[in-house]
Image: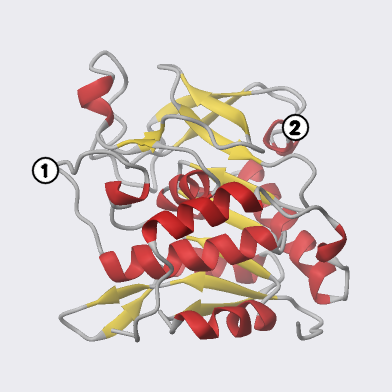
Amino acid sequence: MANYKKPLIGIVGEYDVEKESYVCDNQYVRAIEKAGALPIILPYVKADHLDDVLDLISGLVLTGGKDLSTEFYDAAPHPAAVVQPERDNFEFALARLALKRSMPILGICRGMQLLNVVAGGTLYPHTIDELPNGLDHRNGIPLDQTAHDVLLEPDTRLFQYNGGSPSLRVNSGHHQAVKRLAPDFIISARANDGLAEAIEAPGRPFVIGVQWHPEFFYDSEPTSRNLFHSFVNASRSIAMGAASEVLPAFGSEQIDRDVDRVGVWGGSAP
């Protein structure tokens, strides 16, 4: 991949069908830029161009957005779900290749859920149905405001980013969540109702997913800044020539099996 003073970070956009354009919340872009990298928004390219995309960038942000289709984790469709099949197929294939390369990846909200499913885990399609006594994680509170606490697990990166404190106040805006954790991942934070709020892959340069939206708190909260800075630093190492391929392939057997089941996206851009 290209060797830049500032690493190029790919941020997956969302296709707006009515406007025939890609959109990306500015908070993602500004957080990556402030952390010392150059963000670029990734459109949905053809499957045979995915390796070229990953050759260009040094880190990948899987952003929030619409729900991940239940076909990717063998669950029944839910009436509350709003999906975008083009994004699902593109992003699933892109994340699969990025994981196999051990590329630094930050998954946010939907992005955390996608990481878990690509690596072999499953989701709750609608948490309220299966956990009726749990928190309302899609509570209508604006994302620039906190909604509930998460409890951080010791000996995890997020625990370190939080200065060794076991509790962090976060925002919330989701109704899907990790159900069965993927192999090679650990849960690094939970909500008070037990739901996984963050996952990470030990032994990788940087593969972390958070269920909340830390990009809203980059300026006001040190844990969010530490998270983005650590991600950018890992990406910078790749940009400067660190060889990720010396590491074992990331869960490749499980990833390949899931992709074979669903089918690698081979369509053209919208």
| Numbered mark located on residue 163 in the image | 2
Q: Amino acid at mark 1?
A: Pro
Q: Is residue 218 visible?
A: no
Residue type, numbered disc 2: Gly
The residue tagged 1 is 79
Q: Is residue 161 left or right of residue 45?
A: right
From the viewer's perspective, is 255 left or right of 235?
left
Where's residue 20, x and y in %? 23, 86
Asked which secondary structure carries label 1, the reply is loop
Looking at this rendering, what residue extends furthest in the top direction?
A: 133
Q: Nearer the viewer, residue 88 or 173?
A: 88
Depicted 76 relative to depicted 251: above or below: above
Give residue 174's position: percent from left, percent from top. 32, 41
Residue pictured at 47% horizontal, 58% vertical: 259
59 to 111, vertically: above or below: below
The local secondary structure at tag 2 comes to loop
Mark 2 surroundings: few (<14), some (14-19) or many (≥20) residues within 10 A: few
Q: How is the image coloured?
A: secondary structure
Q: Quadrant of the N terminus?
A: bottom right
Question: Is residue 245 among the parts visible in the rendering?
Answer: yes
Q: Residue furthest left?
A: 79
Q: Say which residue appears at 68% left-offset and 81% top-offset.
A: 55
State yes or no: discs 2 and 1 in contact (Cβ < 8 Å).
no
Which of the two residues, 22 or 265, is positioned nearer the viewer here?
A: 265
Q: Quadrant of residue 176?
A: top left
Give the Cα distance between marks 2 and 1.
41 Å
Q: Nearer the viewer, residue 125 or 57?
A: 125
